[in-house]
Amino acid sequence: MAESSPQIPTGVPTAARVYDVMLGGKDNYEVDRAVAEASLSIMPELRAIALHNRAMLHRVVRHLAAEEGITQFLDLGSGLPTVRNTHEVAQEVNPQAHVVYVDIDPIVLAHGRAILADNANTTVVTADIRRPEDLLGRPDVRALIDFDRPVCVMLVGILHHLADDEKPGRIVQVLRDAMPSGSFFFITNFTRLGDAPESVALEKQLLEQLGSGRVRTPAELAAFFDGLEILSPGLVPLPLWRPDEPVLDASTIDVRFMTGGVGRKP
Ligand code: SAM
């Protein structure tokens, strides 16, 4: 169980800690486990889906660091540190790669600080991406990210926590406009499946218990990539993005419930 601290509210569930439950982590509380259990009772595949999301993150970061020469990663809604974080994958390729983790939940900073104490090229910032202009102006972000050089902006498993009236499309647009040419955007999101009513039931449950949840159609997800050149194989179920191993059955919910892709700013 996570250590309690005055800044960490333990009586209400948070997305970062519920996701930690899904990944088998220990930084969560009873309230978080209750939401995770309720979600799993609707969609038992959620644990596998969380692992697919992490596996795609590893493949994308490795690809961008090794093949596209990206040296700066802005990981928005990074979540609690878990097995193989963005900085570990990027710095395996290039020890000089810079990584800024951003999350609204103060528990991420509390746990990230300890892990990153010896890593001068990586930091954790507590901020709300719904105010992207403030985020981009922060000295602790600018200390590690040079916005005159290409950046990989990561919005992995975060936009489905924002309601439509929080204007996720505008947030992506502000970020896109602020990045130089040659920057990449890596986005994954829950996907509304026409043949799987549980995808809609899960949205309702997350809204009720977590206060946030928005399962988007493939067209809504595609709109986040407006103005970007989408890398092959496109916006696809996560395990199908340049898999290390062939995917034997792509028809299952665990494969299809999240869609992701990578776009390059021309
Ligand atoms: N990106 C990680 C991954 O995909 O493995 C973690 C995803 S986790 C499901 C979503 C994270 O987004 C949580 O840690 C949550 O605290 C964070 N988050 C939600 N809304 C946010 C906001 N408005 N600003 C910053 N972070 C936010």
Image: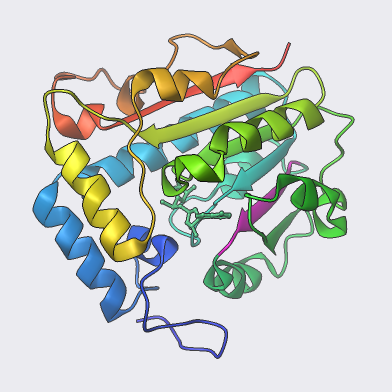
Q: Magenta includes 166?
A: no
Say which quarter of the image contains residue 238.
top left
Task: Find residue 29 and report its horizontal and vertical position in percent.
Answer: 33, 79
Residue closer to the observer: 240 or 103? 103
- Viewed as shown, does residue 109 lie left or right of 121? left
Residue closer to the observer: 237 or 227? 227
- Viewed as shown, does residue 3 lie left or right of 129? left
Q: Main secondary structure of the magenta part?
A: strand
Span highlighted in magenta in the image: 97-104
- Viewed as shown, does residue 205 lie left or right of 234? left
Residue 6 visible, this orientation: yes
Q: Residue furthest front?
A: 165
Q: In the picture, which quadrant includes the C terminus?
A: top right
Q: Is residue 95 above or below residue 252?
A: below
Task: Find residue 254 and report its horizontal and vertical position in percent.
Answer: 20, 35
Residue 93 visible, this orientation: no
Please give the name of the residue rendered at 20% of the width and 39% of the height, measured from the top-left corner.
200
Please give the name of the residue rendered at 79% of the width and 59% of the height, measured from the top-left corner.
120
Q: Is residue 236 above or below residue 209?
A: above
Please give the name of the residue rendered at 35% of the width and 49% of the height, measured from the top-left corner.
213
Say which quarter of the image contains residue 174.
top right
Q: In the picture, which quadrant includes the N terminus?
A: bottom left
Task: Find residue 235 and report its horizontal and vertical position in percent.
Answer: 42, 17
- Viewed as shown, does residue 248 lie left or right of 69? left
Q: Is residue 102 above or below residue 14?
A: above
Task: Find residue 38 and report its horizontal and vertical position in percent.
Answer: 16, 61
Residue closer to the observer: 177 or 157? 177
Please give the name of the residue rendered at 23% of the width and 50% of the height, measured from the top-left corner.
204
